[in-house]
């Protein structure tokens, strides 16, 4: 039976995307698991694969078309012996499954999937089977999101081996509920002068008009929403970095043979991850009508890219060594700059770090990324005169840090305790290795 291939939702919040590139052409015979096209969302360029076999009867959307709504027909897939006249007039069930759409919300159904009865056939795409084999997954414990429960690549990419999944299922599923962002901006809220008003204002001046792409629109909407709906307050402290700088130099010399070079930011990530464990009430997110307190330290780090930014998430950061965090952060940052991150790599977490110190910024206030409970703004380390322990005046490398806090989630004293834990770890860096 001929079916319409629909524009897939590659993340929980995706409403539209750009059909960047077709990897098949009309008349091509495709197999289950074959990559059909590349789709650009507001954050990344991702592939999606065929679930069923058949022949591409017609490509309905041209390459480069932007603003294609989710569930819009983009192609027609025909069975053997069929022609376009056999294609349904109404939209048929989706014939493709999103690749790399293993956002955190996918983890809950995977963990909670009912085991397939012994000997029962498991329906899965060839690509999903290969990934499952590489990850050591038991496909009978994975819930399929494809047609008729078929397991596709998206279902296995974010899944974990059964033993771990059961452990997660035993506790409330915080990540799954954390996906919804804060309440949308209400109609009628002031958003600034209209487009027409601004165009008239600058009608006699030379300018270049830059259309908003998906990423810029999303950033504008989410940060406007954040500042209008989240009651921010700010906590500021300075940290002396001399001990950390000396310790970092010693570590880097010993790690040189392994090709590892730790940055100050790696120490900050580790310090924040440990602080989330030391002050667990700060390891929390706002979920609309409740607060979710997370158990793992999943730390998001802002990465600037052309036209916007990503916040890739380092999961279980408190359990990883400094060298492991450094390697993972470099990999995530590199792939973020080419928009090759999967949704599960930049969604989630309870807390974020934004570091502009390397750009010479002394201090700043960062905007909370909902549903996170806080974000740490990190400035540059600058040599300043300080009062030493013996009362004399000396010089120290001092870095300013500002913690932006959602008052619905974290109160002032609690935020202060968290920031204190971060400072203590950075000023006594050897303790981070304990």
Image: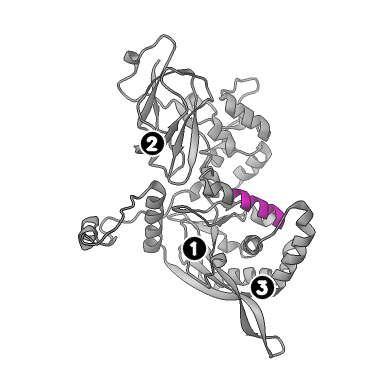
Image marks 3 and 2: residues in contact by CB distance under 8 Å: no
Determine which residue is flagged by label 2: 64
* x, y percent for residue 121: 60, 20
Determine which residue is flagged by label 1: 409
Label 3 and label 2: CA atoms lie apart by: 49 Å
Image marks 3 and 1: residues in contact by CB distance under 8 Å: no
Q: Nearer the viewer, residue 247 or 181?
A: 247
Extreme residue toward the top, this view: 81
* x, y percent for residue 42: 43, 46
Q: Is residue 134 visible?
A: yes
Q: Nearer the viewer, residue 113 or 415?
A: 415
Q: Regarding mark 2 in the picture, which secondary structure is present there?
A: loop
The boundaries of the magenta stretch are: 320-332
Determine which residue is flagged by label 3: 241
Left or right for 125, reference 28: right
Q: Mark 3 against mark 1, which lies toward the viewer?
A: 3
Magenta-drawn stretch, dominant element (helix, strand or loop): helix
Extreme residue toward the front, this view: 206
Q: Nearer the viewer, residue 95 or 47?
A: 47
Residue at the location (29% across, 58% down)?
Answer: 207
Label 1 and label 2: CA atoms lie apart by: 42 Å
């Amino acid at each position: 039976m001929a079916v319409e291939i629909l524009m897939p939702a590659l993340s929980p919040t995706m409403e539209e995307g750009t059909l960047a590139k077709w990897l098949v052409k009309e008349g091509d015979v495709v197999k289950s698991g074959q990559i059909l096209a590349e789709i650009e969302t507001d954050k990344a360029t991702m592939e999606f694969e065929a679930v069923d076999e058949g022949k591409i009867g017609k490509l309905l959307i041209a390459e480069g078309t932007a603003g294609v709504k989710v569930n819009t027909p983009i192609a027609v897939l025909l069975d053997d012996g069929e022609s376009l006249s056999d294609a349904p007039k109404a939209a048929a069930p989706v014939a493709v499954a999103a690749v790399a759409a293993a956002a955190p919300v996918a983890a809950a159904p995977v963990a909670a999937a009912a085991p397939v009865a012994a000997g029962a056939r498991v329906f899965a795409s060839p690509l999903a089977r290969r990934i499952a084999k590489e990850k050591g997954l038991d496909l009978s414990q994975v819930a399929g999101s494809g047609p008729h429960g078929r397991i596709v690549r998206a279902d296995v990419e974010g899944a974990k081996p059964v033993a771990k999944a059961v452990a997660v299922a035993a506790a409330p599923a915080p990540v799954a509920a954390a996906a919804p962002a804060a309440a949308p901006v209400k109609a009628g809220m002031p958003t600034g002068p209209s487009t027409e008003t601004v165009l008239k204002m600058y009608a006699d001046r030379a300018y270049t008009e830059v259309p908003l792409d998906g990423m810029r629109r999303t950033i504008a909407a989410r940060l406007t929403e954040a500042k209008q709906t989240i009651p921010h307050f700010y906590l500021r402290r300075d940290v002396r970095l001399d001990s950390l700088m000396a310790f970092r130099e010693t570590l880097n010399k010993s790690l040189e043979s392994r090709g590892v070079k730790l940055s100050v930011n790696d120490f900050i990530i580790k310090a924040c991850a440990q602080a989330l464990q030391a002050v667990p009430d700060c390891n929390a997110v706002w979920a609309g009508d409740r607060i979710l307190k997370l158990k793992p330290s999943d730390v998001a780090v802002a990465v600037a890219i052309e036209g916007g930014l990503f916040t890739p998430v380092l999961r279980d950061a408190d359990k990883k060594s400094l060298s492991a965090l450094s390697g993972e952060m470099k990999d995530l940052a590199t792939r973020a700059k080419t928009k090759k991150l999967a949704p599960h790599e930049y969604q989630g977490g309870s807390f974020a770090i934004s570091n502009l110190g390397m750009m010479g910024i002394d201090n700043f206030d960062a905007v909370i990324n909902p549903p996170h409970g806080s974000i740490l703004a990190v400035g540059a380390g600058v040599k300043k005169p300080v009062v030493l322990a013996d009362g004399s005046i000396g010089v120290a490398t001092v870095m300013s840090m500002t913690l932006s806090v959602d008052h619905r989630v974290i109160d002032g004293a609690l935020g202060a305790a968290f920031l204190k834990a971060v400072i203590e770890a950075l000023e006594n860096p050897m303790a981070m290795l304990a």
